[in-house]
């Protein structure tokens, strides 16, 4: 049994300059840890509730003083009065205290800060790295590196939210990171030579004004080759379409291209991209509520393209189970702050993998330098990680933690590579 002797939360800033919550936990043996919670820009409507103050006179209404007060008050009092057999016992206790269906009373951000800090404190108490306490996996994840940002993550004319490179041909994670960094720098050079903007978006990728979504894929292919690699060989491509951001009244509206589609037409559009480029993964290809569209897309390209549900599944096991039953998508994005506790996030990974889906552990667009998701990606049966581009310290913090983990694992580390996906790569 583990006894918590102190819990303290504070308001800090995330990578966008918005408030978020950080919590510290101390255990009876003196072990201590802290964790900070991220925040998304494009969010699924069924995510657990992130509690914000709503006071427009302070941080434009985005303060989290109430969530902090909930940790330092009601949650602290209840948790210090109890002992916990394991992580699940703590998480279930917090869910019980909150009492709401979607953690709206105390805030999923409040619960998650405690949940992650407790996991890290327990690892410290055991003298182990966090990833070793989460499972027995020694597989290093394939990084999905978001090198061109569009949609809600950037102020430009590109509809698709993320254009990613996946260095599947690397022999290990450290080399995969090098491949990605060299392509990132080559892309900057290519953009500069064309007189394009090289400012970066929320996730560290470039955000140039491009005439179409295909143009983004074309310019990435040029950068891959300039860096000395071959698209479709060492490097595969991925998209986060975030289609819920431009879906309205049953239509998918690509404003930058002046085109709109019904579900079948948009399936054709995405299939065309997959035919024309070495794309292995597409996230949120259809709107979160367009389950008929998702079925069409899965039937059309789900045998050759990893179809990841983010807004579709929101890390919720009940919704994931429904998707598995209806044969919708074949991969699940895991964002701990979508569901609000570590235990529920781990359950979502287990459920997905046991059903033959892949699991992708993910950051949010509003991040901190907390690197917990790196440990989750290695310790569990997840095989991929999404944590942004090769710039911004809030993104690099996760990559650097993965380097440390690979070093600690030594010869037992195995890079997932082409075997990472729910489809042949």
Image (cartoon, rainbow, N blue to C red):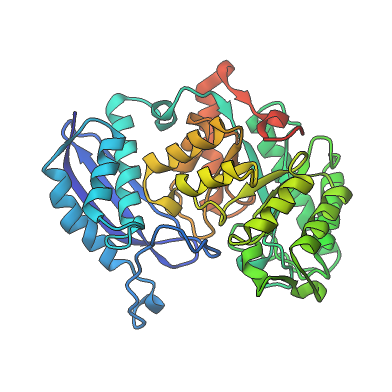
Tell me the residue at 51%/43% (across/down). 321
Tell me the residue at 54%/39% (across/down). 400
| Residue 208 visible to an observer of this rendering | yes
Q: Residue furthest bottom?
A: 57
Out of 408 and 250, give the one closest to the viewer: 250
- Locate the N terminus by quadrant: top left
Whole-percent x, y for residue 261 in the image: 78, 69
- Label count reads 0
Q: Residue furthest left?
A: 81
Whole-percent x, y for residue 14 in the image: 44, 61
Out of 127 and 258, give the one closest to the viewer: 258
Residue 296 relative to residue 23: left or right: right
| Residue 164 visible to an observer of this rendering | no
Residue 158 relative to residue 105: left or right: right
- Locate the C terminus by quadrant: top right
Whole-percent x, y for residue 32 in the image: 26, 39
Reply above or below: 370 against 173: below
Tell me the residue at 28%/67% (across/down). 65
Whole-percent x, y for residue 266 in the image: 77, 62
């Amino acid at each position: 049994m583990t006894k918590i002797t102190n819990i303290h939360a504070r308001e800090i800033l995330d990578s966008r300059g918005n408030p978020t919550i950080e919590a510290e936990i101390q255990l009876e043996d003196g072990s201590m840890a802290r964790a900070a919670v991220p925040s998304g820009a494009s969010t699924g409507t069924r995510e657990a509730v992130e509690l914000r103050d709503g006071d427009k006179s302070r941080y434009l209404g985005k303060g989290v003083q109430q969530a902090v007060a909930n940790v330092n008050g009601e949650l602290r009092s209840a948790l210090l009065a109890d002992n916990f057999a394991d992580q699940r016992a703590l998480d279930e206790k917090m869910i019980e205290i909150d009492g709401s269906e979607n953690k709206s009373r105390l805030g999923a951000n409040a619960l998650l800060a405690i949940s992650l800090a407790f996991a890290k404190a327990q690892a410290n108490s055991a003298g182990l790295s966090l990833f070793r306490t989460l499972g027995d996996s020694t597989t290093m994840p394939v990084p999905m590196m978001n090198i061109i940002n569009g949609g809600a993550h950037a102020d430009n004319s590109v509809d698709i939210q993320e254009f990613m490179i996946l260095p599947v041909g690397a022999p290990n994670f450290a080399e995969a990171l090098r491949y990605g960094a060299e392509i990132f720098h080559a892309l900057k050079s290519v953009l500069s030579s064309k007189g394009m903007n090289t400012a970066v978006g929320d996730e560290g990728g470039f955000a140039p004004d491009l005439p179409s979504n295909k143009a983004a894929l074309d310019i990435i292919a040029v950068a891959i080759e300039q860096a000395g690699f071959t698209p479709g060989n060492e490097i595969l491509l991925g998209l986060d379409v975030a289609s819920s951001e431009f879906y309205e009244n049953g239509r998918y509206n690509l404003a930058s291209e002046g085109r709109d589609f019904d579900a079948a037409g948009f399936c054709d559009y995405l299939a065309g991209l997959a035919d024309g480029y070495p794309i292995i993964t597409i996230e949120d290809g259809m709107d979160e509520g367009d389950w008929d569209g998702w079925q069409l897309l899965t039937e059309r390209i789900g045998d050759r393209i990893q179809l990841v549900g983010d807004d579709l599944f929101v890390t919720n096991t009940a919704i994931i189970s429904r998707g598995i039953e209806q044969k919708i998508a074949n991969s699940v994005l895991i964002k701990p702050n979508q569901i609000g506790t570590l235990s529920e996030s781990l359950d979502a990974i287990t459920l997905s993998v046991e059903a033959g889906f892949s699991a992708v552990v993910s950051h949010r667009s509003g991040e901190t330098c907390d690197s917990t998701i790196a440990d989750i990606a290695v310790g569990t049966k997840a095989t991929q990680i999404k944590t942004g581009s090769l710039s911004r310290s809030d993104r690099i913090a996760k990559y650097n933690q993965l380097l440390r983990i690979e070093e600690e694992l030594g010869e037992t580390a195995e890079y997932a590579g082409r075997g990472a996906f729910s489809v042949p790569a």
